[in-house]
Amino acid sequence: MKIMIRRSPETGLSIYVPKKDLEEPIVESEHEGLWGGWIRIANGWVLDLPEMAAETTLPITVNARKRGEEE
């Protein structure tokens, strides 16, 4: 699924899922650098993020995979 990741002063890192009109803060991540691991958002979803350079600037739209969903 396509998600947008951004940083805001109020919530820190958050994601927006356009098809679901869902915006949630990121509450936990596998790696400090964010990319190439999983993230957990406030509603409990766990998403796998693609490998990207650590210096990738935000906001950015990426393809993420929700854990527990079949391809």
Image: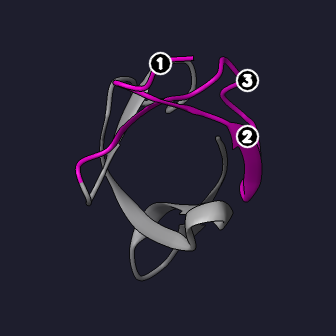
Mark positioned earlier in the residue sequence (2 or 3): 3
Which is in the foreground here, disc 1 or disc 2? 1
Q: Which residue is mark 2?
A: 62
Q: Are marks 1 and 2 in contact (CB under 8 Å)?
A: no
Q: Is residue 51 above or below residue 34?
A: above
Q: Quadrant of the C terminus?
A: top right
Residue stretch rendered in magenta on the structure: 44-71
Q: Residue at x 75, y 38 (%)?
A: 56
Residue 62 included in the magenta stretch of the image: yes
Tag 2: amino acid: Val
70 vs 58, nearest the viewer: 70
Q: Position of residue 5 (x, y in %)?
A: 62, 54
> Mark 3, residues whose alpha carbon is within 10 Å: few (<14), some, or many (≥20)?
few
53 vs 66, nearest the viewer: 66
Numbered tag placed on residue 36 in the rendering: none
Tag 3: amino acid: Ala
Q: Position of residue 60 (x, y in %)?
A: 76, 51
Residue 70 included in the magenta stretch of the image: yes
Q: Position of residue 39 (x, y in %)?
A: 38, 36
Q: Which residue is mark 1?
A: 70
Q: Residue at x 26, y 59 (%)?
A: 42
Q: Which residue is mark 3?
A: 53
Q: Is residue 46 above or below residue 52?
A: below
